[in-house]
Amino acid sequence: MNTKHNRQDLHSFLSQHPSIHPERRAAAVPIMQALQKERGYLNDAAIEEVAHLTGLSTTEVEELATFYTLIYRYPVGRHVVQICDSVCCSIRGADELLVAAEKYSGVPLGAVTPNGALSVLPSICLGLCDRAPAALVDGEGLGPLNKVGLEALLRSLGEED
């Protein structure tokens, strides 16, 4: 997918609407996704770019970016494992999985492994309650998870180049 082309399409779409049009706020998320796909995460310059394209303030864009758990405001690994820590998953063992993930990956939650391969993030409700405890692995739902399966997954992802 050509993200530069997608950003141009979004900019064109936005330019056709007055700045108070409600679609401008809704369009911020796809713009953030396109920039993240291109850059890996949204730094402050990307937030300013989204604000410029949408006519929103940088504060409004920051609010949106920090609300959505699939938008990253800091560098992440080539593979991202988001472990759900909501009530349903927590009751079924997610808290222990998060502790185990730190042990298996060798870095704190939210950090990037030294080889840049992996980040493990806690995430509020992934909508996979029927598969609790669940995770998103590079955007794909997985569950139910256990410590053995998680260790194998993290080892596999962490060894990839």
Image: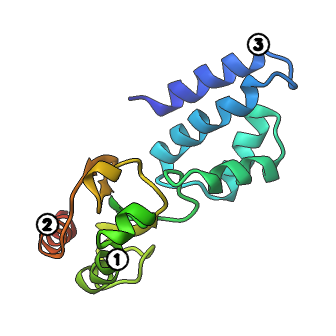
| First in residue order: circle 1 vs circle 3 | 3
Could you say where residue 108 lies in the image, as x and y percent from the top left? 41, 83
Q: Can residue 76 be seen at all in this image of the molecule?
A: no
Quadrant in which the C terminus appears: bottom left
Residue drawn 42% across and 77% down?
109
Could you say where residue 80 lies in the image, as x and y percent from the top left? 35, 60
**Residue type highlighted by circle 2:** Ser
> What residue did someone put label 1 on?
98
Residues marked 3 and 2 touching at CB (< 8 Å): no
**Residue type highlighted by circle 1:** Leu
* Alpha carbons under labels 1 and 3: distance apart: 46 Å
> What residue did someone put label 2 on?
156
- Provide the secondary structure element on which disc 2 rests: helix
**Residue type highlighted by circle 3:** Gln
Q: Is residue 143 above or below residue 150?
A: above
Quadrant in which the N terminus appears: top left
Could you say where residue 45 lies in the image, as x and y percent from the top left? 69, 53
- Single out the mark in the foreground, 2 or 1: 1
Residue drawn 67% across and 31% down?
26
| Crowd class of label 1 (few under 14; some 14 to 19; many from 20; radius 10 Å) | many
> What residue did someone put label 3 on?
16
Residue drawn 38% across and 70% down?
90
